[in-house]
Image (cartoon, grey):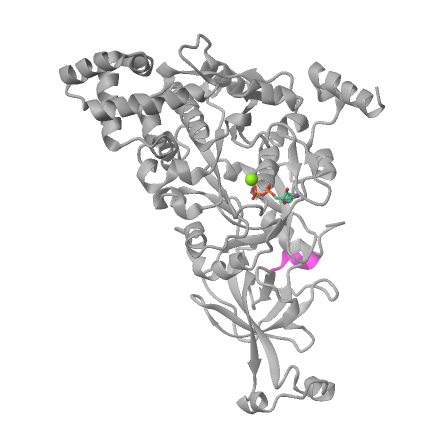
Amino acid sequence: MSGRPPLSGHFPNQFPQSGEAKPIGTVVQGSLSEGLEVRLNPDVSVEEMRVGKFCVVYGRRTRFFSMLTDVTLGTASPKILMNPPAPGDDFLFEVLAGTGTFGTVKLTPMLMFETVGGQSELRPVKTIPSHFSQVHEATSYDFQLVFGSEDNPEKKNFFIGQPLDTDVPVCLDLERFVERSNGIFGKSGTGKSFLTRLILSGVIKKEAAVNLIFDMHSEYGWEAVKEGKDASAVKGLRQLFPGKVQMYTLDPESTRRRGVRDARELYISYDQIEVEDLSLIRGELNLSEASIENANILKHEFGRNWIGTLLGMGGGELQEFCEQHGAHFGSTIALQRKLLKLENLRYIKPVSANNYIGEILDHLSAGKNVVVEFGSQGSLLSYMLAANILSRRIHEAYVRKAEQYLQTKKPADKPRQLIITIEEAHKFLDPKTARQTIFGTIAREMRKYFVTLLVVDQRPSGIDNEVMSQLGTRITALLNDDKDIDAVFTGVSGGQTLRTVLAQLDPKQQALVLGYAVPMPVVVRTRAYDETFYRQVGAQDPAEMDDDQLFREAELANHDLGF
Ligand SMILES: Nc1ncnc2c1ncn2[C@@H]1O[C@H](COP(=O)(O)OP(=O)(O)O)[C@@H](O)[C@H]1O
Ligand SMILES: [Mg+2]
């Protein structure tokens, strides 16, 4: 976008000036429920019409912002199909094109731009344009009108990508984004992690919320590998926002090896593990239902340190305990054996003196973002256990804070909006566990306690329906499985037409964005996460760097010079 937007944009019924937006065709049929059928102009090739394209229909009073959702070939007479022109018969091709043969596209109107009482505004679609209304490609002004601009000082807009066929920025409204839980979906390798890092950068940069990020593959906090011809590294959030991100690690050696010197170590002790945590990792530990029941008995008898106590018991002692308390010996001893696996997790300690939760909470309330790196401890078992324990306690503290704020109503007591990012979300939120675990609770209670989730997942069909329908904004890269595609549209009206759009995305760096943080669904080429982005978003001004960062930059500079 350059210069002032064209004046014509201000009046819903005014056509774009010539040269501004290409005319595409004419509305010939349609309904509010099924969408519009548009006959393409003879000079427009169907091959240029990709699903997901943003088009504008000029009704008499109203402009309809629409998405192209299907493309078909039409003929005026079946006779033409029985005698198609011979290959190379360009003359006949030309004669038929536009009258005998033509392309049609289906448009789904998503928003109306109309003038009510002298004010032009965007509203939900309640009607359709009349016969033979003209359809044009959207201009950059149209995009800006609908998706806003990053420069608007009154809004926390974040440029997330560009439309398929133009270079106008499409923005997410981050203030709306952080108010609900959100999802980032797509099959493996489609760009979920890149999208997540991009959006988290936006949230940090615009201070829309603070983040607690469970970084399973160590790719958000500090350098991540970029696939491609020259496998290079991209920067992590800590590198982009040195003063605003604190890293914690469950695998200090790995984190240090990767060049992070000031990550805090994090340990979890047996007495912090609840039976609820074990239910969540039941599958990973291969625990039976009976073992969980026995865990409850043990907890009841031994209190907080029941795991430590159980692990220290000999066979005879255990048998005696079971007889006395009506626990099943076979499954209790199995429980003991399986819990021994926890000893292999290097961040588990019998006891831990440090109050990590309090520390993390202090960072969050000071507006710092916290990344928890797993390093070699990124197995599902390990990831789910740590994320669940930490999130439960942080959520508890948030509930207390929020309740206090509701009583006092003092702005100083207001908790900072917190987003918790989890990967492999379906493991935490499948229909069976979502009802019992902290993540299900957070997703369902919405923003009541100022905590929401950012779930990143390649298998959305594994996520509980109720949780899916609570997700405010869904950003979805390519998915192949029908069940996963259906899941993304849970609770979305008109989801059926968007299915085709989703199925046609490129396998990389394209996404369908829909929901609360955008006025209408839109397909974007995801903004590149690269040097240009670092410059646009990062705090590269040395005045904003902390000492540690300056030191590291100096060290890197020396390194580059060959010292
Ligand atoms: N926004 C982006 N900017 C730059 N490269 C990207 C972007 N999105 C995806 N890529 C490329 O695609 C690869 C896979 O993306 P990634 O986010 O790791 O996929 P996923 O997490 O879905 O498995 C990356 O290594 C990178 O090369
Ligand atoms: Mg990934």
Residue 492 in percent (x, y) is at 42, 53
**Image quadrant containing the C terminus:** top right
Residue 420 in percent (x, y) is at 48, 30
Res. 448 image quadrant: top left
Can residue 236 be spotted in the picture? yes
- Tell whether position 422 is magenta: no
Left or right: 13 as drawn, with respect to 420? right
- Residue sitting nearer the eye, 419 or 246: 246
Can residue 399 be spotted in the picture? no
Q: Is residue 476 above or below residue 131?
A: above
Residue range in magenta is 7-12
Residue 211 in percent (x, y) is at 53, 28
Residue 70 in percent (x, y) is at 53, 67
Query: Which quadrant of the picture is home to ligand 2?
Result: top right
- Tell whether position 10 is magenta: yes
- Residue sitting nearer the eye, 26 or 215: 215
Res. 549 image quadrant: top right
Left or right: 480 as drawn, with respect to 58? left
Main secondary structure of the magenta stretch: helix
Residue plotted at (62% across, 67% down):
49
- Residue sitting nearer the eye, 533 or 220: 220
Residue plotted at (72% across, 64% down):
17
Q: How many marks?
A: 0
Q: Is residue 29 above or below residue 427?
A: below
Residue plotted at (66% across, 82% down):
97
Residue plotted at (31% across, 32% down):
436
Left or right: 473 as drawn, with respect to 254? left
- Residue sitting nearer the eye, 324 or 524: 324
